[in-house]
Amino acid sequence: MKQKLLSFLTLMVISFLWGCYPNGPEYVDEYDVAVTNYDKDFNFKSKSTYSLPDKIVIIDGKPDNPPQYIKDINAAPLLAAIDANMQANGWTKVDVTKSPDVQLLPASWSTTTIVGGYWGNYWCWYYYYYCGGGWYYPYSYYTSFTTGTLLITMVDSNSDSLDGSKKLSWTAGLNGLLGYSSDVNRAKNGINQAFKQSPYLKIK
Amino acid sequence: MKKSIYILIAAGMFIASGARAQSSFTTYYSMGFGTGDVNTYISAPSFRGFGMEYKNYIKPNLSIGIDVAWNVFYERKDYDTYTSGTLSVSGVQYRYINAVPIFVNTNYYFKPGGKIKPYVGLGIGTMSMNRKTEMNLYYISEDSWNFALKPEAGILFNANPEMDILIAGKYNYGFAANGMTAQSYFTLNLGLVWKRHLD
């Protein structure tokens, strides 16, 4: 009897502890992350102008298809948030034809894995007007993302390498779960956070 | 390392089997409080833990046995920014430590025949530490097996001829190993001790 009681109690304790093993995120926004990286040799303070497209391209892994873009109603507040942060940091927006110092290129995807370099050739297709010099998107720091990602990259307009590519000076990746009504607001918060954690972008 | 654990357990069983007078089996609930690097990583105390201990009394005031426990530390770190070099990552972090200490113990009892038996003890063994940091859908996991020592002190309350109640404080200290610095935590344990008289 004693042994049975002992076994029973031991099993009860193990079951109880197993059952209350701590879980991870409970709310969708707890998955959101903002990742930024930059070229430490790039002199941001020597630059002052930037360009930004009026659309955010969707990278769908199908380069033969016509380019798709995020709906304007969703893209507009995100582009506005990028503009607001850049201008708050002292940058002046100019048209891409006016030789900006840097170019900001936003893109989005919802696939599970993207390998850096794999999507480089898309840029000349999606943003054909950037490809006068025939450049390819430079090597990315990221190798994979899952769920929904908004990637903002800043390239130095005046940096031509031997293969015609532009130099990456700053990149921000915002990642989180998609399919919720708060996606745009969460993405805006992510954009604000990306600039907040990149104080080197403040030039004035 | 697995081989070492088997040797440790076998040694404990061998030593324990040499006893004549009495053996006991203890199950206990264990609360953990991180110290040192464990506390830096997770400052929240752990209320998820349990252990089992088998003891043989080689003298009325001296026992040798095996003590195995499991403590789970967990803490949710609020949204924050973590920077390494030029890379910055902001998000909510979930941190976990699963600690499994395995010790061969020897305990000394001050009043072996009394209703209340204070004791002190020392364990020598190993401690498995798994540290997991979750952020977004990704995680980083680190594992180590640390050589470990465990001083402890406690009191056994005699409930009846077959059962004691245990209150014990234990300090698990694992030395640096596998790229992980020394890992240590204090536990407060409440348990039931089933005594078995062999002679």
Image (cartoon, coloured by chain):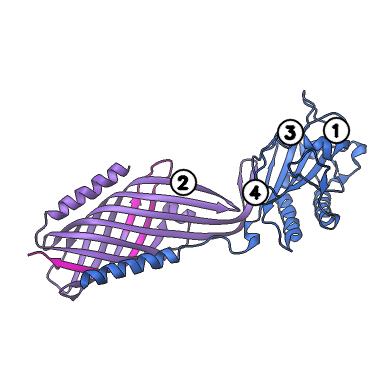
Chain colours: A blue, B purple
- The numbered mark at residue A131 is 1
Confirm whether residue A111 shows in the render. yes
Instruction: Tell me, yes or no, whether dots 1 and 2 are on the same chain.
Output: no
- Chain of the residue under label 4: A
- Disc 3 residue crowd, few under 14, some 14–19, many 20+, Cα 10 Å: some
Q: Circle 4 is placed at which residue position?
A: A146
* Residue indicated by mark 3: A138
Which-is-in-front pick, marks 1 and 2? 1
Q: Which residue is mark 2?
A: B142
Tell me which numbered mark, 1 or 4, is placed earlier along the sequence.
Answer: 1
**Is B177 situated left or right of A129 in this image?**
left
Magenta region, residue range: B171-199
Q: Residue at x 27, y 59 (%)?
A: B152
Label whose residue precedes the other's in the sequence (4 or 3): 3
| Magenta portion: prevailing SS class | strand
Q: Which secondary structure lies at badge 2?
A: strand
Q: Is B176 included in the stretch rendered in magenta?
A: yes
Q: Position of residue A131 (x, y in %)?
A: 85, 33
Q: CA distance from mark 1 to mark 2?
A: 45 Å
The reply to whether the magenta stretch includes residue B116 is no
Q: Residue furthest top?
A: A162
- Give the mark toward the camera: 1 or 4: 4
